[in-house]
Amino acid sequence: MKVILKQDVKGTGKKGAILEVSDGYAKNFLLKKGLAEQASSVAVNSLKLQKEAEERKRAEEIREIKELAAKIDKTEVTLSIKCGENGKVFGSVTSKEIASKLEDLGFAVDKKKIQLKDAIKNVGIYPVEIRMMEGVIAKIAVKVIPEEK
């Protein structure tokens, strides 16, 4: 019997898979527990339309992320940090502070996507990568200046 899985079934298949299973397994387990539905032509077409809609939605999300990365790319973020008399820095600049400053500039970026090898502990300009998603990276410049008293 051909069935379409409504959810992942361990040892059988993933959600949305169209499988040929024994009649007993289909009737007594998969259909009875609501894990699958019989693969009629209507159900198969419905599944195909649903997958196409999901692909379009995913493509739209990827396009939006790439547009955001293009806008963020080459942006300069300026952060001020407390310094002592001789230029010694108190504290450091972290990805959380960079994400907060980017949000002030109108870019919603998760702090976990900002790639810092170590926290920034000196005054200067630092290149920082933001991994938006697999294969999409935006590069910004973080300018750290001494806080005015």
Image: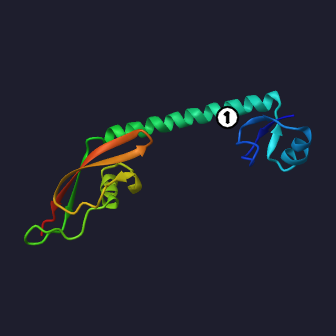
Q: How many marks?
A: 1
Taking the image as shown, residue 72 lies to the left or right of residue 134, namely left
Residue 73 spot, x, y in % from top left? 30, 41
Taking the image as shown, residue 11 lies to the left or right of residue 69, namely right
Using the image, determine if residue 79 lies above or below residue 48: below
Image quadrant holding the C terminus, namely bottom left
Q: How is the image coloured?
A: rainbow
**According to the image, label 1 marks what residue?**
50
Query: In this view of the protein, which residue sits in the foreground, 112 or 78?
Result: 112
Q: Residue at x 73, y 32 (%)?
A: 46
Residue 35 spot, x, y in % from top left? 79, 47
Residue 100 spot, x, y in % from top left? 33, 58
Question: Of the residues shown, which amino acid type is indicated by label 1?
Answer: Gln
Using the image, determine if residue 124 lies above or below residue 28: below
Image quadrant holding the N terminus, namely top right
Q: Residue furthest front?
A: 11
Q: Splitting the image into 4 quarters, where does residue 110 fall? A: bottom left
Using the image, determine if residue 142 lies above or below residue 49: below
Q: Splitting the image into 4 quarters, where does residue 146 fall? A: bottom left
Residue 122 spot, x, y in % from top left? 18, 61
Neighbour tally class for label 1: few under 14, some 14-19, many 20 plus, Cα within 10 Å: few
Q: Residue at x 26, y 41 (%)?
A: 74
SS at circle 1: helix
Q: Residue at x 84, y 50 (%)?
A: 33
Q: Splitting the image into 4 quarters, where does residue 145 fall? A: bottom left
